[in-house]
Amino acid sequence: MGAFVGISGRMSAAAYFGCVGLLTLVGIGIAMLVRPAFGHTVLQSIGLEAVPRAEAASFYSTRVAPLFDSRCVSCHGDRREKAGLRLDSYAAVLRGSKDGAVIKPGDPKNSELFHRISLPSSDDRAMPPSGKTPLTPDEVTVIRLWIAQGASGVQRTIAGAPRLVQEVRIPQDDPQAASKARASLSQQVRKLQAEMPGVIAYQSRNSADLEVNASLKGSAFGDAQLHALMPIQAEIVRLDLSGTAVTDASAAMLAAMPKLQVLRLSGSKITEVTIAALAQSKSLRSLTIGDIKIAGNGLASLRQNHVTVYGGADAP
Amino acid sequence: MRPDPQTHIRVWDLPTRLFHWVIVLLVCAAWFSADQGYMRVHLVCGLSLLSLLLFRIAWGVVGSTTARFRNFLHPPVRVVGYLKGLAGGEKILHAGHNPAGGLMVIVLIGVLLAQVGTGLFANDGVKFRGPLALLVSEDMSTRLATIHGLIFNLILLLIWCHVVAIGFYMLVRGDNLVWPMVTGKKPRTHVPADSNLIFTRSYLALILLGLSAAIALWVLAQGG
């Protein structure tokens, strides 16, 4: 013990560091009381408090959390924790900020979070702050109703909640990407277009996808002509063989076209042999077979693959 | 309560003592202002800290004996040896910083500089940007803001270690380190008899502080 006895009969090192440990614990305790969010974090991380979790199908997960993710988490998430508040998980939302809970279940008017999102944008305390996209009235209503109904992580629906509006993003054409994609096959396409005028065309101005309409050629377009398209077959998305002389000899080629989505075969020489082969296509979405006779449930595989089939007569 | 000149000897010069206590005040003010959202005050605290840290580095080169880095910077082996001796109850006298204290000074200056540096480029995601935030990408500024927040926790830990160490010397070793940092004087019995302390004139400190403040203002101006 000698080494731990302080000189001049003062406090021993062991006693001192014991006091320091005690003081540290008291300090952490005070911090947990003063900063409830910190308190919950500590208790939850050492397993003395259950971590609240929201179900994936709950109103919180499907309607409230996406709003927090899109409007709040950039400042109240893992990268930044303004005011000690995180809104990137159900547990964090309930934990609150450095000043305490921001949600008072059942009482939106006295919930700091709802108060802040309800303030006019001219108010310095309004959230999201000026310059950021504000919540729409419907979005504010969603959060108000969720708090009013108890801020549950389990409840799936809330009566009177505005309908969910799905944001639809239309992909923009990229002319540079299209010309890059076209570069490798443009020579072949031009050659085939010269040989078969009016049959081959790009699907759109900014696309490398091809449409082939052989129905214009009628019986003059057979297996040989279809096989002549082999160099460009990987880019064909729509193929109209209606009224042509194409036969089952081309079944393998048709089934192997990687991008083929729409195929028209009515009036051609094709039989159920080709139809069966087409069940292997992973891209096909629409198939017109006219009066080609199909035995039994020969179309079942295609329909299982979510291919819409038009026509088809029962085989005798 | 002025120390008796017969029993006490001057070890700390005025600039070093002022630096120490103003840093304490500025760190507290920076913490409070950031916590309460007074970001202009926080900016002033940060720039003042930058000036003082630059001054302290210069003072560590040309200042008084106990303020100079070369007199309290020791290799790690010596620091460990000192701490072992401390645990063994040895009483080794030092006029200024002991080897462990010297290491703490360097670490604190380094960490505070990192904190000020990251703060210059940080943004709070709402209305405040550090004076140099526009010189880096938004993403980098946000990353530095995160680091700024993390370093603050490290500073709190270092402050706690500093206070615990001071308490250890005071309560276990009977060596009050706080009062000398106020008055500048230590009991003669706590200072090696062969100490040859030379004090640099305070006007030089004023000049260095002015230069440091000018550098801090120049940094501020770089943000446009």
Image (cartoon, coloured by chain):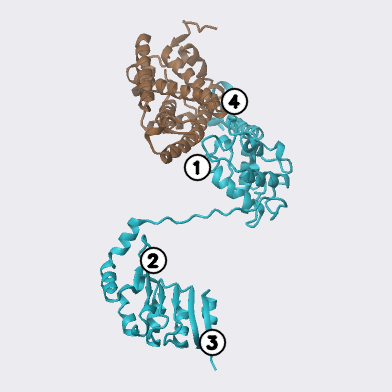
Q: Answer with mark 4 or mark 1, whichever residue precedes in sequence.
A: 4
Residue A11 horizontal/vertical position (percent): 59, 25
* Residue B220 in view here: yes
- Chain designation of label 2: A
Using the image as rendered, state which of residue B144 and residue A295 is in the foreground.
A295
Amino acid at pointer 3: Ala
Q: Answer with mark 2 or mark 4, whichever residue precedes in sequence.
A: 4
The picture quadrant where one finds residue A97 is top right
Q: Which mark is residue A79?
A: 1
- Give the mark toward the camera: 2 or 4: 2
Left-right relation of B193 to A195: right
- Chain designation of label 3: A
Residue A300 position (above or below residue B222):
below
- Give the mark toward the camera: 3 or 1: 3
Q: Which residue is mark 3?
A: A313
Q: Which mark is residue A203?
A: 2
Q: Which residue is mark 4?
A: A11
- Looking at the image, which residue is at 44% across and 18% down? B19
Amino acid at pointer 1: Arg
Q: Colour of chain A?
A: cyan
Question: How far, Cα to Cα, is label 2 from label 3?
Answer: 31 Å
The picture quadrant where one finds residue A179 is bottom left
Sort mark 2 into few (<14), some (14-19) or many (20+) by Cα contacts within 10 Å: some
Using the image as rendered, state which of residue B89 and residue A149 is in the foreground.
A149
* Element type at mark 2: loop
Residue B45 horizontal/vertical position (percent): 47, 22
- Give the mark toward the camera: 2 or 1: 2
* Label 2–label 1 contact, CB within 8 A: no
Sort mark 3 into few (<14), some (14-19) or many (20+) by Cα contacts within 10 Å: few
Q: Colour of chain B?
A: brown
Q: Answer with mark 3 or mark 1, whichever residue precedes in sequence.
A: 1
